[in-house]
Amino acid sequence: MKAIPAALSGPSSSLAGLRILVTGLGVTGFPAAVHLGERGADVIVIDGDDTADVSEKAQILEVFDVDIRRGPDHVETLPEGDLDLVVTSPGWRPDQPVLAAAAEAGIPVIGEVELAWRIRGTNDAKWLAITGTNGKTTTTTMLESMLLAAGLKAKACGNIGTPLLEAVLEPGLEVLAIELSSFQLHWQESMSADAAAVLNIAPDHLDWHGSADAYARDKAKIFHNAKLACVYSCADEATLHMVEDADVIEGAKAIGFTTGVPRPGELGVVDDLLVDRAFIPQRYSSAAELASLDDVAAATGVAGSQPAPHQIANALAAACLARAIDVPGQAIAAGLQNHSLGAHRMVTVAEADGIRWVDDSKATNTHAANASLAAFDSIIWIAGGLPKGADFTSLFADHRERLKALVLIGSDDSAYREAIAATIPDLDVVRIEPALAVDSGVPKRRGEAVAAAAVDAAARLAEAGDTVLLAPAAASMDQFLNYNTRGELFTEAVNTHLER
């Protein structure tokens, strides 16, 4: 195996003479190609699509003499000639033919995280990294809000907002709040975050990783070489084992978070207050107040109500990372008060005739859907999509008393049907015809008829006191452009229904 070129380190040294392949012209591939091209590397970019977006990016890259190869034929084999490095995009699986060929040929393959870590140079911004099966984005934006409330120049980046490659080159930033997916972590080797957190672990993306163990191993990479703190969930023993097995910098602490009363070395909840028993000198005899559950409620769009347990956990995880770099308690509270929950994450779309309509389209796996279902009592559940190899049996079993009816969307409902038969065979189920997901030629409108039919079906089933919950427990791409458009079309359909 060739070594990763030493010239890559730092943001400005010349890469002339290096031949580098970039796979994909997406959110991470494009800035990688621009940066490497600017530094004089001989860059080849391959992308299986030939869309207008790819064409536009290709025109920009021509300025840097980047060799653009578009279309499905170019992603099956390595380009001719020697290569010094492959920089891959997160969505490309390791068994993709071109990546498998690179590995067999001994060519190093890295991703966005590894590239960003190596090119950061003298940029001394602190890295606070977050991963987990669910809650990553909310925790990252909560953390960013806390950092900003403390007067720090901070930015949320990585798998959210600004690509990490762009953030590390942005002058003046003091802290990066970095959301990292399992795909991104798979390709990283040398990142040394100041503090890192794994929020939770449940089987997901098994089609990409191949097994639950492989998925967990990639998530655990976030703790490698952590400097100050490794944050784990007291409710998820697997995350603690990840910390115990991690090779960290001497002095890094294991910090737990719990929605119950914390022990020394943990953050938790006492008398409706978020408290710190980890980062204070008197942690064995006292706790420091950080914020209130009212602050968490405000941060998650339910001011005046009790926040959901998973949102309390998200706030505590963000507070752990902030406290690891000495953010004061008052900034934790202020950050939560200033925070706005992202779209399609447990958002109440409307309340009418005693029926609540909730958009949690971001619940793309069983773990996320479980948290959504646990937040309500009498539910008309809209679910379905690409299940990614998941088993839904425990989900139906755990919430049999909450589920009043199920509206099934998605192209394949077999996994749901099997789980229903094994747990709640008499559950009222309405199947939305998959053929409604026609391609109108406008990608963002694909699935519009599915969303409308699902809302109409749910409305016929719902009564005062019910919650109609879109929490699909599956990916969206079989019928919608992405989970965002699935949520947007659901919201439109709800508003249209209520205006009739």
Image (spheres, grey):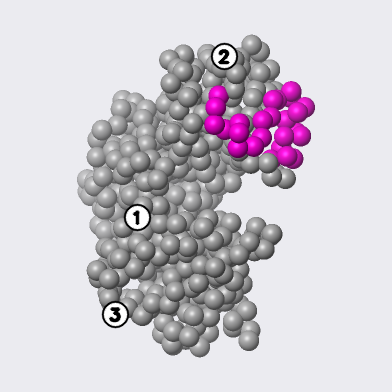
- Tag 1 or tag 2, which sits nearer the N-term? 2
Residue that protrudes farthest toward the top in the picture: 17
Q: Amino acid at mark 3?
A: Asp
Question: Looking at the picture, how far across and down is residue 153, in whole percent?
Answer: 58, 40
Question: Looking at the picture, how far across and down is residue 151, in whole percent?
Answer: 56, 44
- The span picked out in magenta is 54-78
Taking 202 as reference, is 410 left or right?
right
Q: Is residue 67 magenta?
A: yes
Q: Secondary structure at mark 3?
A: loop
Question: Looking at the picture, how far across and down is residue 281, in whole percent?
Answer: 29, 41
x 60%, y 65%: residue: 438
Q: Amino acid at mark 2?
A: Asp
Q: Secondary structure at mark 1?
A: loop
Q: In this picture, is 56 found above or below 99?
A: below
CB atoms of marks 1 and 3 within 8 Å: no
Instruction: Determine which of the numbered discs, if any, sits on residue 82 in the image.
Output: 2
Q: Amino acid at mark 1?
A: Ala
Q: In this picture, is 216 found above or below 341?
A: above
How far is mark 1 from mark 3, CA to CA? 22 Å
| Residue holding disc 1 | 390
Label 1 Cα neighbours within 10 Å, binned few <14 / some 14-19 / many ≥20: some
Question: Looking at the picture, how far across and down is residue 95, in whole percent?
Answer: 43, 34
Taking 156 as reference, is 68 left or right?
right
CB atoms of marks 3 and 2 within 8 Å: no
Nearest the eye: 399 or 238: 399
| Residue holding disc 3 | 426
Q: In this picture, is 261 found above or below 222?
A: below
Res 195 seen here? no
